[in-house]
Amino acid sequence: MVDLDDARFLTVAEVADVMRVSRMTVYRLVHSGDLPAIRFGRSFRVPASAVQAAMSAHVADVSRSA
């Protein structure tokens, strides 16, 4: 059984704010399958854990080599 006590879902607008991208970019990520989401009627909800995982996976290592 899934424990939903710690589950937190964000709206597309909230995800866009957190990721500092447009809402359209979030919709593209959802529709491409790069960002999992649940559809409620005509709107989407994205698990906060999925946003964190997506941001962690796309962090670039920008270290300078001297």
Image (tube, rainbow, N blue to C red):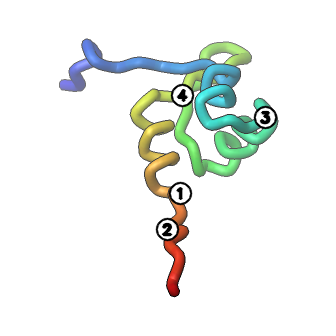
Mark 2–mark 1 distance (CA, rounded to whole Å): 9 Å
Instruction: Please state which of residues 15 and 30 is positioned toward the viewer in this rendering.
Output: 15
The extreme left residue here reads: 1
Of pointers 1 and 3, the one earlier in the residue sequence: 3
User: In the rendered image, which residue does mark 3 sit on?
Assistant: 22
Mark 3–mark 4 distance (CA, rounded to whole Å): 15 Å
Mark 4–mark 1 distance (CA, rounded to whole Å): 17 Å
Q: Is residue 9 left or right of residue 30?
A: left
Tell me whether circle 4 and circle 2 mark residues in contact (CB < 8 Å): no
User: In the rendered image, which residue does mark 2 sit on?
Assistant: 61
Of pointers 3 and 4, the one earlier in the residue sequence: 3
Mark 4 falls on what kind of element? strand
Instruction: Please state which of residues 10 and 55 is positioned toward the viewer in this rendering.
Output: 55
Q: Residue at x 60, y 49 (%)?
A: 33
Instruction: Please state which of residues 22 and 50 is positioned toward the viewer in this rendering.
Output: 22
Nearer mark to the viewer, of 4 and 1: 1
Nearer mark to the viewer, of 3 and 4: 3
Q: Position of residue 37 (x, y in %)?
A: 55, 32
